[in-house]
Image (spheres, rainbow, N blue to C red):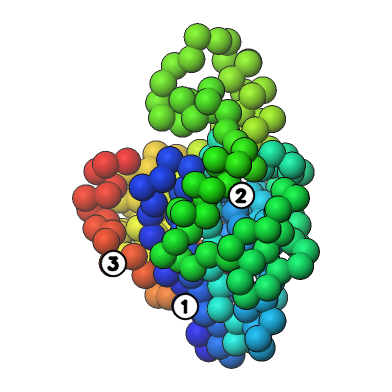
Amino acid sequence: MALRFETRASDSPWVDTVWTCTSAQVAEMTSVAGVCWGLVFWQRDGIAYASISGPETRTGTAPVPEGATFVGIEFAVGTSLRTVPTPALVDGGVELPDATRRSFRLDGARWETPSADDAEALVNRLVRAGAVIRDPLVTDVRRGHAPAVTARTVERRFRETTGLTQGAVRQIERARNASALLAAGAPVADVVTGLDYFDEPHLARALRRYVGRTARQLRDGTGGAIALNLDRQDLHPRRDLRLV
């Protein structure tokens, strides 16, 4: 059984991560909560597909097409599509019509289907055309700036732009970070302390709700296929816990 995920960070302020995946002898996988919307391109048996994925607020189970290859672009929190509000995508998605191996249709135009290496080039074209936009207030908040508006206004704009509350985003991101640290060998007690969980049961509930794994499963690499890259070679548990 194999579901091989590879992810990389991006130097584009519009992109969170770019990922690739191949599947073999996997019928289903555990989906994981995430805060980003994205574009996903995949091929199977010579047929091409494209879709818009939305933020996910909980873990679940998703089918995996046998022998498929995927390329995904996860967009930064605060960005959105001009024609599809991100709140409408939460816990769902939209299949894009007329996809081929070379192109797909979005926002009334055809665009070249990207590889993982030229994902940012596609994003730049979408931004220049106005197909992808962002809320500068949400972007500033994500960068740690304090805007000159009320907290209520910030929360309203955040929800309107992302479909999520700021609290939900923090909880999901924290659980994903905890998962990567545990998979890399960090002791549970260190993760609890480093990521400011109340105690181990609090961490366990978050992992169950957002990741669908226990701390032991993450440590041992058990539980089946999961839509999360836990084989992070650049992750150092002690160092990264100190930086949280």
Disc with the residue nearer the chain's start (3 vs 2): 2
What SS does tag 2 mark? loop
- Name the residue nearer the viewer: 135 or 154: 135
- Name the residue nearer the viewer: 169 or 128: 128
**Amino acid of disc 2:** Trp
**Image location (x, y in percent) of residue 160:** 69, 30
Residue at (63% x, 16% y) in the render: 153
User: What distance separates the C-alpha of mark 3 from that of mark 2?
Assistant: 25 Å
Residue at (62% x, 75% y) in the render: 101
Q: Residue furthest left?
A: 239
* Number of other residues with Cα within 10 Å of mark 2, as a class: few under 14, some 14 to 19, many 20 or more: many
User: What distance separates the C-alpha of mark 1 from that of mark 3?
Assistant: 14 Å
What SS does tag 3 mark? loop
In the rendered image, which residue does mark 2 sit on?
37
* Number of other residues with Cα within 10 Å of mark 1, as a class: few under 14, some 14 to 19, many 20 or more: some
- Left or right placement of residue 182 versus residue 203 in this view: left
**Image location (x, y in percent) of residue 206:** 54, 50
- Asked whether the viewer can see residue 147, the reply is yes
In the rendered image, which residue does mark 3 sit on?
233
- Asked whether the viewer can see residue 223, the reply is no
User: What distance separates the C-alpha of mark 2 from that of mark 1?
Assistant: 21 Å
Residue at (54% x, 48% y) in the render: 125
**Image location (x, y in percent) of residue 39:** 61, 57
Asked if 160 appears above or below 2 in the picture, the reply is above
- Left or right placement of residue 159 versus residue 8 in this view: right
Disc with the residue nearer the chain's start (2 vs 1): 1
Asked if 4 appears above or below 139 in the picture, the reply is below
In the rendered image, which residue does mark 1 sit on?
4
Residue at (56% x, 88% y) in the render: 24
Q: Are marks 3 and 2 in contact (CB under 8 Å)?
A: no
**Image location (x, y in percent) of residue 128:** 55, 40
**Amino acid of disc 3:** Gln
